[in-house]
Amino acid sequence: MLKKRRSKISSKSKAKNLKKYFDTSIAVSESLLKKTLLQSQLLSSFISPTQNGESSHLTGASPDNTHGFMVSLENLQKARAVTEHQYLTTLVMEIHTHTRLDLNPNPEFDSIRAIFYSILNDVPGNSGNIVGAIAIILDDPVSFQNSLLCCNNNCDIVFVDSEVGLINKFIEVVKKWDPDIIGGYEIQLLSWGYLLERAHVLNMNLHSELSRAELKFNASDDDTNSDLKVTGRIVLDIWRLMRHEIALQSYTFENIVYHILHKRVPLYSFRDLSFWWEQTNPVYRHRTFNFYLIRVTGMLELFERLDLIGRTSELARLFGIQFYEVLSRGSQFRVESMMLRLAKPLNYISVSPSVQQRAKMRAPEFLPLILEPDSQFYVDPVIVLDFQSLYPSMIIAYNYCFSTCLGRVELLGQNTPFEFGATQLKENPKLIDKLLRKNLIVFFALRRGVCQAKS
């Protein structure tokens, strides 16, 4: 018993000594860690001082991106392509509809209660964006106007009596500012497309009113799945543009604003927005009002942060193409535009074959194509490989030029013009003999009937 008691006492004393040792070692290690951390912070402050005064003074302990933003804020501010004014007017618009319970807005049944818009006029002396709203008076005119006028002092609010008057008032705003670019986050759902379809239900030809040129247009003949086009104006569907700017799993307005503008904005259902707007209490109506103001002002902030209009305008000048073609066309179209610029000083014009000429052309012997997979469910991942600037790369690699075109072998040596693609070509027989003597024509056994020459 005595030995067991002594062993228990000795084990307890060893545990106490071990605990004291670890406590002292941890305290020493913590002091050393704090000391090294302070030294590193002091050295970093002298070597590379932080440019942003609002950032944390602790460097090295926290990651650069603590909230999982997909776009860095500092890099975008240095990526402006144009620092001068573009002299372009941009108008973005969102509409508020009276929906039925939990259903999505339908232009055939759901009327428009209000239109919210924001205008960016990129001219010298512009003080800022113009924010406005057009609303239909629902109940007592005085109480309804007071409930909205107290929401935002910087918003120009106009009140009308009917939905037709609402649309006509918005047409006056468009004609007054005459925007070059019109846009919305979801064009067909809650923006210009919905407005055009709702105007058609009310027997109004809104498309001709919004266009800069007079034309005959019937909304029933328009394809709802096609891109919305307004004559004389550039129509931008913002969520489609964001797909090419940033890679995300969700392209909702709230998620885009979070990753690009680093802000949190609320998301409400159509049922809640309609319920709050119909209430006489200004507190509820205030939520719906601010919800749409955040959306229209946020879209212009996205344009400003990404410098989308400036970059697109600069690329349009560089390639010599239109503004919307920079966003919708591929790299081959840009290369052709630059080649046309080079050909014009040389007094050359490009061939523009008609439909009949293309139909009479001989079928190509070799044509690179992209094999697309069938539209079905695949358990394993599917990889689709595409060519990046295939034809310009081939022209550069093999030194192809219009002056090296000889045509087919069976047609060479003739004194008369022969068929060459969609046009005609005439080669001098002396030039063919000269190329053959100097061995400048290479015949390929695998590609019979085709001869190539390099200049």
Image (cartoon, rainbow, N blue to C red):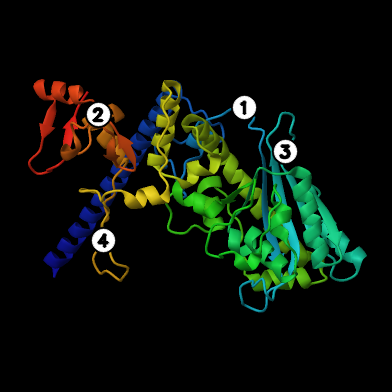
User: Can residue 12 be seen in this snapshot?
Assistant: yes
* Residue 201, quarter of picture: bottom right
Q: Are marks 3 and 2 in contact (CB under 8 Å)?
A: no
Q: Are marks 1 and 3 in contact (CB under 8 Å)?
A: no
Q: Amino acid at mark 1?
A: Glu
Residue 70 visible to the viewer: no
Horizontal side of 19 relative to 230 (left or right) equals: left
Q: Residue at image x 48%, y 30%?
A: 318
- Camera-side mark, 4 or 3: 4
Tag 4 near tag 3, CB within 8 Å: no
The residue under label 4 is which amino acid type? Val
Q: Secondary structure at mark 2?
A: loop
Residue 198 is marked as: none
380 and 182: which is toward the camera: 182
Q: Give the answer, above or below, for where 148 lies relative to 281.
A: above
Which numbered circle lies on residue 84?
1
- Give the distance between the C-alpha atoms of the residues marked 4 and 3, in whole angstroms: 48 Å
